[in-house]
Image: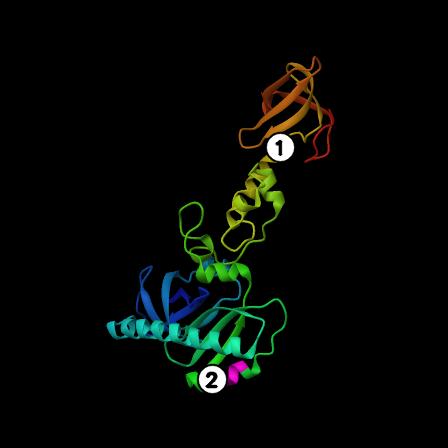
Amino acid sequence: MPKYVVRTGVMRALGVYSSGRDDAYARDAEVVVRSDRGMEIGCVLCEATDEARAQLKDPGQGQILRTLTADDDRERFRLLEEARREFEVCQRIIAEQKLEMKLVDVEHILGGERVVVYYLAENRVDFRELVRLLAAEFQTRVEMRQIGVRDEARVLADYGDCGKPVCCNTHLVQMPPVSMKMAKIQKATLDPTKISGRCGRLKCCLRYEYDTYESLQKELPPLGSDIVTSRGRARVLAQEILAGQLLVETEDHRRVMITADEVVTVLKRGGRGRKPKN
């Protein structure tokens, strides 16, 4: 029985789904699946090989029911229109209840088993009355799901500063941890407005090449190191990590750029990431 990795829902959850009738599905094929949430529309990414499964963390499980039909497609667009109306109703009731939460999106599952409400909140919210009112209004099960600002960007954002669709809404499976150290080592501008993504946090793409930068940096003498080069003794002032070059100050106070291959030995290692004193 073949199995496939399928992406489903607003949050683009990944799961391993079996094909009950030994049907074969190509990449990007739209299918109707039965997940733990109910009947949903999904997109086939690849066959669920051992290698593919190893890349997934706690994937969902389910079954592929069929290839998306014209009737399924019409139902999808009907539910999208329905979700817009449900969003407005939910927004109104939240305002009436004076709840300290921000409504992000409302998702209506294809099979009609439930409506999922995504929201942001800084503190705990008692939404029991909200759920009761929404369930009476929608006549179906209502599930409240609190998300973070990065997840909000995944749901609502479209394009990033690079001009391409945001990573969190395309290929990213998990949100990687990103720190200011990653921006500094790549010599990216430290202007928050330029290194922040649509979520207001540091851009995920700062994480992509960090391991390469860190590995290459370990092969270079740290800043402030006293070294011996083919030109004599010098002190490391700066590193050009990708180019494998060093800006050094020689004993006669000249500043020159050398390659890492010109370093004969390191006499005294400086503190990594610390600028040398003048």
Residue 56 appears anywhere in the view: no
Residue 199 appears anywhere in the view: yes
SS majority, magenta: helix
The residue identified by callout 1 is 219
Residue 122 x, y percent position in the rendering: 61, 66
Q: Amino acid at mark 1?
A: Glu
Along the line of sight, which residue is nearer the eye, 25 or 121? 121
Mark 2–mark 1 distance (CA, rounded to whole Å) = 61 Å
Residue 275 x, y percent position in the rendering: 70, 31
Task: Report helix, strand or loop for mark 1.
Answer: loop
The residue identified by callout 2 is 135
Question: Looking at the picture, does residue 22 appear above or below residue 234?
Answer: below
Question: Looking at the picture, does residue 216 appear above or below residue 148?
Answer: above
Q: Which mark is residue 20?
A: none
Quadrant for the N terminus in the image: bottom left
Residue 80 x, y percent position in the rendering: 35, 71
The answer to whether the residue labelled 2 contacts the one labelled 1, judged by CB atoms less than 8 Å apart, is no
- Residue 247 part of the magenta segment: no
Q: Amino acid at mark 2?
A: Ala
Q: What residue sits 44% from the left and 55% below the top?
A: 171
Q: Answer with left or right where residue 41 lies relative to residue 185.
A: left
Residue 39 x, y percent position in the rendering: 38, 77
- Examine the image and state in which quarter residue 214 appears: top right
- Residue 131 part of the magenta segment: yes
Task: Report helix, strand or loop for mark 2.
Answer: helix
Label 2 vs label 1, nearer the camera: 2
Badge 2: residue crowd in 10 Å (few <14, some 14–19, many ≥20): some
- Examine the image and state in which quarter residue 246 appears: top right
Along the line of sight, which residue is nearer the eye, 94 or 253? 94
The boundaries of the magenta stretch are 130-135
